[in-house]
Image (cartoon, grey):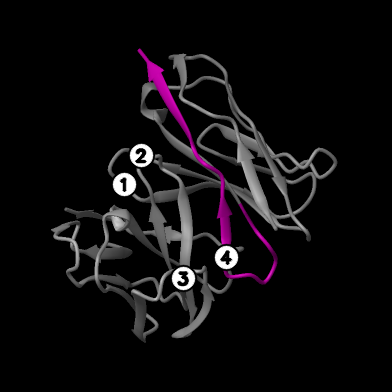
Amino acid sequence: DTAVSQTPKYLVTQMGNDKSIKCEQNLGHDTMYWYKQDSKKFLKIMFSYNNKELIINETVPNRFSPKSPDKAHLNLHINSLELGDSAVYFCASSLGTSNNEQFFGPGTRLTVL
Amino acid sequence: GDSVTQMEGPVTLSEEAFLTINCTYTATGYPSLFWYVQYPGEGLQLLLKATKADDKGSNKGFEATYRKETTSFHLEKGSVQVSDSAVYFCALSEPGGFKTIFGAGTRLFVKA
């Protein structure tokens, strides 16, 4: 059984479009995260949610809007896509705080043309 | 703010060689320290962790000791295998926090 799943795995789109990435975890965790990994593998936190509430928003442009309909899901919607948004986006989850092990999804490779 | 610095890669070793990947950190409190590993085309997975000074985390032959006096958490393995080829990330998280700070990652290539 997949612990943290993301869809789609690959996303190729034109500048200016709006797209969504979905994330689901079946671990019973109460905290979920979105990370962005650039082409040099640098990994940066974007958002953290605990019990469906936004806890961390790391100065991400407001074109990015996360939504957590329940504790098992954290989706990411991106408006007006730009070339610089091209990256791999990882969803992760943990039980409680980030002091505990985080489980990562397989990633979504977003390419903006 | 908190930060993590790890040695730049890539690191290229022959099978059965000794591995060290250096990691140092800056933190205001007493963070938990982690090593995560990313295999090609996959998400990160926890390799080991330590939550307080002098703790040693270990897993799959890898070890790292939380050194508060030198603010370091170096990763070591006595004999690497080709299957250890991956990107290794050092990371920290403050107690009670919801944010993990990752180092830039170190790519390891192991040749047969």
Q: Are marks 2 and 4 on the same chain?
A: yes
Residue that badge 3 annotates: A47
- Amino acid type of the residue tagged 1 in the rendering: Glu
Q: Dot 1 falls on which chain?
A: B
Residue that badge 1 annotates: B42
- Amino acid type of the residue tagged 2 in the rendering: Tyr
Determine the CA span between mark 1 and mark 3. 20 Å
Determine the CA span between mark 2 and mark 4. 23 Å
Identify which residue is drawn at 35% across, 39% down: B39
* Residue A30 belongs to the span the image colors magenta: no
Quick one: label 2 or label 4, which is nearer the N terminus? 2
Q: Position of residue A55 (x, y in %)?
A: 54, 79
- Amino acid type of the residue tagged 4 in the rendering: Lys
- In the rendered structure, the answer to whether residue A81 lies left or right of residue B2 reads left
Identify which residue is drawn at 57% across, 65% down: B99
- In the rendered structure, the answer to whether residue A103 lies left or right of residue B29 reads left
Q: Dot 2 falls on which chain?
A: B
Residue that badge 2 annotates: B39
Residue that badge 4 annotates: B99
Question: Given this view, does label 2 or label 4 mark the residue nearer the observer?
Answer: 4
Determine the CA span between mark 4 and mark 1. 21 Å
Q: Position of residue B27 (x, y in %)?
A: 74, 54
